[in-house]
Amino acid sequence: MLLRLTTTHTPATDLSFILHKHPDRVQTFPLPFGSAHIFYPEASAERCTIALLLDVDPVALVRGNRGSEGMLSQYVNDRPYVASSLLCVAMGDVFSSAMAGICKKRPELVDLVLPLTVELPVVAVRAKAGLSLIQRLFEPLGYQVSAEPIANDNPANSYLALKLTANLTVKQLLTHIYVLIPVLDNAKHYWIGNDEVSKLLRKGDGWLAQHPECELITTRYLRYQKSLTSAALEHLLQAVAPETTTQTELDQEQVSEPTERQSLHTQRHNVIVQRLKASGAQRILDLGCGEGKLLRELLKESQFSAVVGMDLSTRALAILQQRIERLPERQRQRLSLLHGSLLYRDARLKGFDAAAIVEVLEHLELGHLAAFERTVFGFARPKLVLVTTPNREYNQLFPSLPADQLRHRHHRFEWTRAEFAVWAERVAASYNYRVSIEPLGPEDPNHGAPSQLGVFEDAT
């Protein structure tokens, strides 16, 4: 069984530092069921590929484990060839430091987003699921998926040669593979117990709770054991529960003009509503709607004939649903709620005049932005997209915010004005939009405004 990981980052041989494997050496690691060999088919400044060759001994795999639950009972099978839980065990052994985010010689490389390609010559997946399941698992994480079918005599399984391409950190990619390959194959070779729940939560930290197929992944990873699946999903649900704003965070939001005692939160919503009204838009998306504060403002305007709120948090949507019941009937009829992710193409998001994405971007992992861009600007493609995000330069003006700390404990990043402009202009050029960037909130002459607004208009 072979795994190939390639980068074209410059210098590409940085990959060897991240993975703690020297390009000039072939290394062999003993495993309970065989051995793993690490080598570099190519290693230059322009392109570097590392290969993990897993040599599975079918006899060693079953020796001493007859009758044990989860162990393979046959000597002749597809285990030596397909990507399976055996591969994941090998990865956990030979790439343990990289998967833990440890790189003592070059620590700055751990969080570096690289152009990465993974090739798996043989992946097994149930015949009825096939390529569709692979796409559902990997595309929301920002991967481009390419798969070629492999002829076989087993009607129960499909075998595919799989190629995955994405811009991610190496740690992110390895943990994705580690969790999702057994989900595809659905035939772990070892006992599934409480330790597997802890392992799944560790390896899924930062991405699994937000994945649109979180329940499917958890269920298949834990081999349909209801008690274990329920325990894991409970932990994951807590990870995406609506954020409780602390008093410090409330203080930071009370940014107002001397004559207008409005919170920054209110100012954002007022600007968004006025922008949408001026555009003539009638069908509006609020993506990442949370508990619905912007939705309530949108419903006050009769111009908006259809208002749809979407959020990943089922708890936030449940709270919002209760609040909807108290709205006037005419407003309730114009409002719809959707459970979904901004990282996954969703046909329900197509056909809208405008989308508001207010203080959502910074809650995503940087490695997930490409999937977000494809979903919103490439697939849903509203005529107008309004994106607001904090301006990191302004943070030092908050007296209660320690130096170099992000504005909210759940923010994954915050951009300066220049960084936001670079991102916005690249997205606009890639998806044929025009973009303008405006300050949002009171401006400081040196640090700008507390938030920044990107106004994307369809240029087609």
Image (cartoon, rainbow, N blue to C red):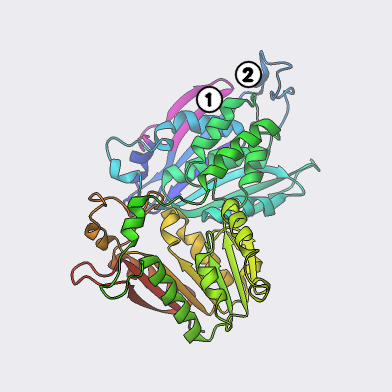
Q: Position of residue 209 (x, y in %)?
A: 54, 46
Say whether disc 2 or disc 1 marks the residue closer to the N-terminus.
Answer: 1
403 in relation to 256, above or below: above
208 in relation to 251, above or below: above
Instruction: Please state which amino acid type lies under the numbered disc 2.
Output: Ala
| Residue toward you, 449 or 385 | 449
Q: Which residues are magenta?
A: 20-39
Q: Position of residue 247 (x, y in %)?
A: 36, 51
- Dot 1 surroundings within 10 Å: few (below 14), some, or many (20 or more)? some
Q: Is residue 426 visible?
A: no
| Residue toward you, 460 or 1 | 460
| Residue toward you, 402 or 3 | 402
Looking at the image, which residue sits at the far left? 446
Q: Secondary structure at mark 2?
A: helix
Mark number displayed over residue 35: 1
Rendered residue at 32%/63% (across/down): 254
Mark number displayed over residue 60: 2
